[in-house]
Image (cartoon, rainbow, N blue to C red):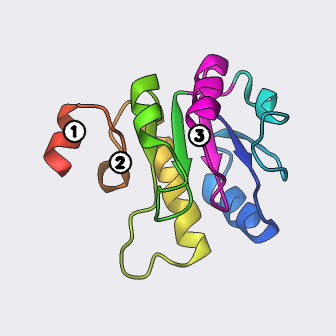
Amino acid sequence: MKAIAYNIKPDEKEWLVLANYKKHDITIIANSLTADTLSFAVGKEALLVFNNDYLSEAMIQGLKTLGIKYITTSSFETDHLDLEAAGFAGIKVANVPLEAGNTDPKLRMEQVIKNLDQWASGKCVGKACCCQNDCAAVKTLK
């Protein structure tokens, strides 16, 4: 899967690269996701969000226009993402479920890659799912 990661810290980058192990084609950008850097997402299917970049409805619509189908955040929270706008746009969203022991950056990056792996194989991301879409997989998790 072709993905782009914005606003990534050096330690997160290291763990992301190790967790990915060349499975996905990930472009890593140190800058935050803004209207000026949005165009870097052209040709990508997935967006990896780090450090709580805020994704507004306008930003999500811009991402959809560029072809983004999936958004995964390395955080437990999703309040920095407009989930309703993502659902309306048909973009699937995942986070890192808060579970014992997964506060370690290495484990968080492994979950981010697991989310990409599941989507790439056409599967739901399970407990990491934050989609607002009314699919059978989401119904069984709620």
Q: In which quarter of the image is residue 4?
A: top right
Q: In this picture, which residue range is highlighted in magenta?
A: 44-68
The answer to the question of whether label 1 and label 2 lie on touching residues, with beta carbons closer than 8 A, is yes
Residue shown at the point (63%, 59%) measured from the top left:
52
Question: In the rendered view, would you say 122 is above or below 27?
Answer: above
Q: Is residue 73 magenta?
A: no
- The residue carrying mark 3 is 56
Residue shown at the point (37%, 81%) measured from the top left:
100
Q: Please tell me whether mark 1 sits on a helix, a strand or a loop.
A: helix
Question: In the rendered view, would you say 60 is above or below 108?
Answer: above
Q: Can residue 1 be seen in this view?
A: no
Q: In which quarter of the image is residue 140?
A: top left
Q: Quadrant of residue 58?
A: top right
- The residue carrying mark 1 is 137
Residue 110: x percent and y percent? Answer: 54, 61
Q: Please tell me whether mark 2 sits on a helix, a strand or a loop.
A: loop
Residue shown at the point (37%, 47%) measured from the top left:
130
First in sequence: mark 3 vs mark 1 = 3
Distance CA(mark 3)–CA(mark 2) = 19 Å
- Amino acid carrying label 1: it is Ala
Residue 66: x percent and y percent? Answer: 67, 20
Question: In the rendered view, would you say 57 is above or below 83?
Answer: above
Distance CA(mark 1)–CA(mark 2) = 9 Å
Distance CA(mark 3)–CA(mark 1) = 26 Å
- Amino acid carrying label 3: it is Ser
- The mark closer to the camera, 3 or 1, is 3
Residue 95: x percent and y percent? Answer: 46, 55
- Amino acid carrying label 2: it is Cys
- The residue carrying mark 2 is 129
How would you rate the neighbour count of disc 3 (Cα within 10 Å): few for under 14, some for 14-19, many for 20 or more? some
How would you rate the neighbour count of disc 1 (Cα within 10 Å): few for under 14, some for 14-19, many for 20 or more? some
First in sequence: mark 3 vs mark 2 = 3
